[in-house]
Amino acid sequence: MPSVAVKLYSVFFKFLLKHRLQNRIQAPPEHSDAFGVTTRPEESVAAANPSFTNGVATKDIHIDPFTSLSIRIFLPESALTPPEPRSNPNHNNAARKPRSDHGSASTRDSNSLPSRRNSYEPSTVMHREESMRRNSAGNGVVEGLNLMSNGVYRGYSPAGDNRRKLPVMLQFHGGGWVSGSNDSVANDMFCRRIAKLCDVIVVAVGYRLAPENRYPAAFEDGMKVMTWLAKQANLAECSKSMGVGKVGSGGGIGGVGGGVGGIEFKKPDAHRHIVDSFGASIVEPWLAAHGDPSRCILLGASCGANIADYVTRKAVEGGKLLDPVKVVAQVLLYPFFVGSVPTHSEIKLANSYFYDKPMCMLAWKLFLPEEEFGLDHPAANPLISGRGPPLKLMPPTLTVVAEHDWMRDRAIAYSEELRKVNVDAPVLEYKDAVHEFATLDVLIKSPQAQVCAEDIAIWVKKYISRRGHEFSY
């Protein structure tokens, strides 16, 4: 059974949330505002901090001028470590040594062990503030960019190859459609943990909340971020060809004039960034320098899992329209799936902790338009017929469920349907856990939260590893 603290907090949480939901339902209908809101005044938020506090730097970006849609980027400090040269013939053999070797001092120096979060791309240790780096030819030294300014990481300029590329994970928070935010204290802590354990750049999406913006606003926001990510990747590629030349033997640019041969010459940032009409760079430097959109993972918690599944489906349907972004896997944490035919858990656990069934029905009424309300709505029930694309085209899907969550059975049933068509779709169930146990760890201090994050990292690395070996650490 859950701890006494979890039970007490659940009672308090349900009382407050139910009161807020009922007030919103009883409030007179307001005219829909397309701009919307992404957080509530009562939400405790964590300020963005680009100085690698606890090993992760964060920044907020408002990406849509017509709505309140925003993102928070979580960049792990491991991104600042340049990749190890791949010319070493013993590189792969050394990287694949089993983890059990760590106990033998005679076989390997403990200081040379790669950290767990760096497992799929071993790297050498180099201080992030080092301003002198060797060029790719190895025959000269050029002055690199000043990466830190007053303790704040500015990011590399988009050009150049001597930097570490990390997978990109799009994260959608929970909150029953009407609450929660991508910059809340709870979500900030969760995303930091995932960024470090999975060694990925986490892009937490601040989608518009209901009832100010009902379905399909949140789902459209998810696709907007996916499209924005593809646009950023393409802009970064364009920037690579701008303002980069060679200092030739005569010292000129592009082989003309004198100087040290073979040393790369880089123009200032202002001369090779693509800028908008106001002169501001439209290339996001953190993603341009460190993001690898060809290894994209979608992760959603609670109602965010519904958005992640929708965006994944649209990405599969879109095919190459989102190039170079490729969704290689998705993670669904205790999805907010419901249906008109109740499952065993929906009957037995209807009055479960935190989000019980009556409260969730209120949330769905606030989210779905009145004329579309129904428990078998495509946004609510993944098992109805007619949803595209065919399940056999879906990427690998990890589903996490809690023992005391009334929505668990339908999430498991969805995973079973995926496995029937040979999609890798395991289910991880956590004993004595409640809905939102992993994402509300800052409040309920669940012992399963850290274990869950580690399990997610182990599974995800099968699909983001460059070597394709899930046990590379």
Image (cartoon, rainbow, N blue to C red):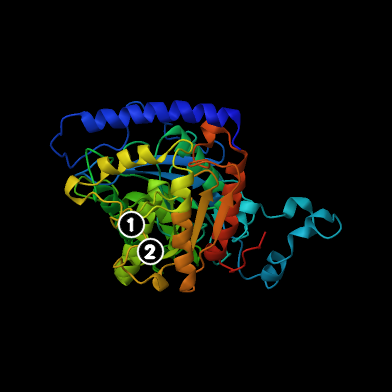
To which quarter of the image does residue 103 belong? bottom right
Q: Residue at x 50, y 59 (%)?
A: 398
Q: Is residue 194 left or right of residue 124?
A: left
From the top left corner, tell me how far across and down residue 27 is, in percent: 20, 29
Q: Is residue 215 above or below residue 88?
A: above
From the top left corner, tell me how far across and down residue 381 is, in percent: 34, 56
Tell me the distance, in whole angstroms, between the alpha carbons under discs 2 and 1: 8 Å
Position of the C terminus, as image quadrant, is bottom right
Q: Residue at x 33, y 71 (%)?
A: 319
Amino acid tagged 1: Met
Q: Is residue 132 visible?
A: no
Q: Is residue 387 visible?
A: yes
To which quarter of the image does residue 312 belong? bottom left
Point out which mark residue 1 bears.
none
Position of the N terminus, as image quadrant, is top right
Query: Which residue bears the numbered disc 2?
Result: 325
Front position in the image: 218 or 64? 218
Amino acid tagged 2: Val
From the top left corner, tell me how far across and down residue 274 is, in percent: 28, 55
Indicate which disc, 2 or 1, sits on the residue closer to the N terminus.
1
* Number of numbered callouts drawn: 2
Front position in the image: 422 or 119? 422
Considering the numbered disc 2 on the image, is that residue within a helix, a strand or a loop? Answer: loop
Circle 1 crowding by C-alpha within 10 Å: few under 14, some 14–19, many from 20 = many
Front position in the image: 331 or 292? 331
Q: Is residue 416 above or below residue 22?
A: below
Query: Which residue bears the numbered disc 1?
Result: 226
Q: Residue at x 26, y 53 (%)?
A: 220
Q: Residue at x 35, y 68 (%)?
A: 316
From the top left corner, tell me how far across and down residue 415 is, in percent: 47, 62
Asked if marks 2 and 1 touch (Cβ < 8 Å), the reply is yes
Front position in the image: 305 or 28? 28
